Amino acid sequence: MGTVAPSFTFGIEEEYHLVDLESRHFAAAPEELMRISEAELGKQVAPEFFRSQIEVGTSVHNDFAAARKELARLRGTIARIAARFGMAPIAASTHPFADRSGLETTPKPRYQALAEDFGGIGRRLAICGMHVHVAIDDPDMRIDLMNQVRYFLPHFLMLSTSSPFWQGEDTGLKSYRLAVFHELPRTGLPQRFESFTEYERTINVLLRNGVIEDATKIWWDLRPSARFPTLEMRVTDVCTRLDDALSIAALYACTLRMLYRLRRANQKWRSYPAFLIEENRWRAQRYGVSETLFDFGQGKLVPFATLIAELTGLLAEDAAALGCEREVRHALNIATGGTSADRQVTRYRHLQSLGATQAEALVGVVDGLIAETVEGCDV
């Protein structure tokens, strides 16, 4: 076992759609928009697979208030620059109504190669997500904690959902993004590994045969980062509200710290079959916070708000140690008040009840997303 305690420093990456402020459809970022953004934000901003997407990433943090301030600055900067081009970012994993056909792939060799590799599936990837990195320096500990924290991935997903619509249809799912993403290879729940050596040996089968160039093309819900000594959580939708994003990042970091405490005491979180965790993952994707997840210890379905209340209690020591009690408590607000997906569907139905057409109601949903994305940000 590793003898040095992890630092549990963290970073957050968010992907946004760019929309035209007149039509509210997808808008391709002109080169000038990216040039100005890179001049202001440096390596903290990057293009994404489609030209209508943009990604930001925080620096490494050990303070959640500072991380919130930085993410607010990143969002606000992108919104301010986009407005100069008649555009706005929306922090939602799918656009409520825009047609993905005709979207242009970003002209970078990596994305062009991916488009060629993905074929028709690639043309559906008009989706955005949030990734949270937490530093776990020891590679074997990283794998051990990855095996255990898989149990909680459905909980994090449930709190993040922001993709109920797809090309104008209310899909009935709270995270339709995951359905689209799951069409790709090398996605979903990672398997259990006995060691970092076994993980490397497994990945190297693909590397040696030229199937992938590096482990960045492993798109599991959770993975050892190929770039940093971190465990990267990728299952979540991008959160429309800043507070929700920070809450999920805090829950993830605190859960890893709790599992480390168990490890230090020669204990582990009980292991459950991937089949059962996948069932919770589906329930999170389909129903969101208003429904139930399995508590496999009890062997029964439990209201999600009850599970989150129990989890935040379990993590009290870790939240105090990492200085994120406020962020962890906020998960209770999400569980009882709903996610972006819930607010989008509620707004859509409300506007229709007032006499709006389907098209008008969907535009109203986009307007709500534009406003929520920059709440608390300096634009």
Image: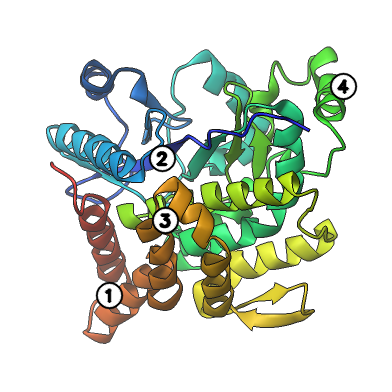
Residue type, mark 4 in image: Val
Q: Which residue is mark 1?
A: 357
Label 3 – label 1 distance at C-alpha:
35 Å
For the point 56% across and 76% down, which residue is it? Answer: 304
| Mark 2 vs mark 3: in front | 3
Mark sitting earlier along the chain (4/3): 4
| Mark 3 vs mark 1: in front | 3
Residue type, mark 3 in image: Ser
Mark sitting earlier along the chain (2/3): 2
Mark sitting earlier along the chain (3/1): 3
Mark sitting earlier along the chain (2/4): 2
Mark sitting earlier along the chain (1/2): 2
Q: Which mark is residue 247?
A: 3
Q: Given the current orientation, which residue lies at the most extreme bottom position? A: 353
Residue 185 in the figure: left or right of residue 194: left
Q: Residues within 10 Å of mark 3 (few under 14, many from 20)?
A: many
For the point 72% across and 27% down, which residue is it? Answer: 139
Residue 96 shows in the view: no
Q: Does the residue at mark 1 contact the one at mark 4 (Cβ under 8 Å)?
A: no
| Mark 1 vs mark 4: in front | 4
Q: Which residue is mark 4?
A: 205
Query: Residue 266, relative to residue 357: is it above or below?
Result: above
Camera-side residue of 211 and 23? 211
Q: Which mark is residue 14?
A: 2
Camera-side residue of 65 and 29? 65
Query: Residue 133, relative to residue 285: is it above or below?
Result: above
Q: How many tags in the picture?
A: 4
Mark sitting earlier along the chain (1/4): 4
Q: Quadrant of residue 75?
A: top left
Label 1 – label 4 distance at C-alpha:
53 Å
Label 2 – label 3 distance at C-alpha:
14 Å
Q: Does the residue at mark 3 contact the one at mark 1 (Cβ under 8 Å)?
A: no
